[in-house]
Amino acid sequence: QVQLVESGGGLVQAGGSLRLSCAASGRIDKIDRINAMGWWTQFPGKRRELVAAITRDGRTNYADFVKGRFTISRDNAKNTVYLQMNSLKPEDTAVYYCTAAELPYGVDYWGLGTQVTVSS
């Protein structure tokens, strides 16, 4: 199958920045079929929701609450997706999960998540 390993989370002050990374590994035939990669989050007491996603050909989609602050990118050669998080707010505090899918949307695989904590 496919494993997604996130890194880059941590503690940052409000207004600061973090860069999350997620590398896909596992069966080559499965990895080669990955189209969409993305980041989801789960705020306390709420369901998981999309933060940003990017297709293999570079089309992006962002949640309204991160537009203008977060940027998603990917390196197809490295099977890696990134999330540059700028102007962080305390309400951005959550676990962020990396995802991948064979279609240009949706989720087939989940990472274990990385904690982002923004202090005021």
Image: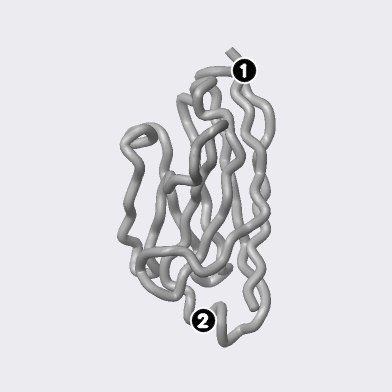
**Residue 53 percent across, percent down from the top left:** 40, 55
| Quadrant showing the C terminus | top right
Q: Which of the numbered marks, if any, corresponds to residue 32?
A: 2
Q: Residue at x 42, y 72 (%)?
A: 35
Image marks 2 and 1: residues in contact by CB distance under 8 Å: no
Q: Residue at x 57, y 31 (%)?
A: 44
Mark 1: few, some, or many residues within 10 Å (few <14, many ≥20)?
some
Task: Measure the C-alpha gap from mark 2 to mark 1.
Answer: 39 Å
Residue pointed to by mark 1: 119
User: What is the three-letter code of the residue carrying label 2?
Assistant: Asp
**Residue 92 percent across, percent down from the top left:** 51, 29
Q: Secondary structure at mark 2?
A: helix
Please say if 89 is above or below 75.
above
| Image side of residue 102 versus residue 29, left or right | left
| Quadrant showing the N terminus | bottom right
**Residue 7 percent across, percent down from the top left:** 67, 48
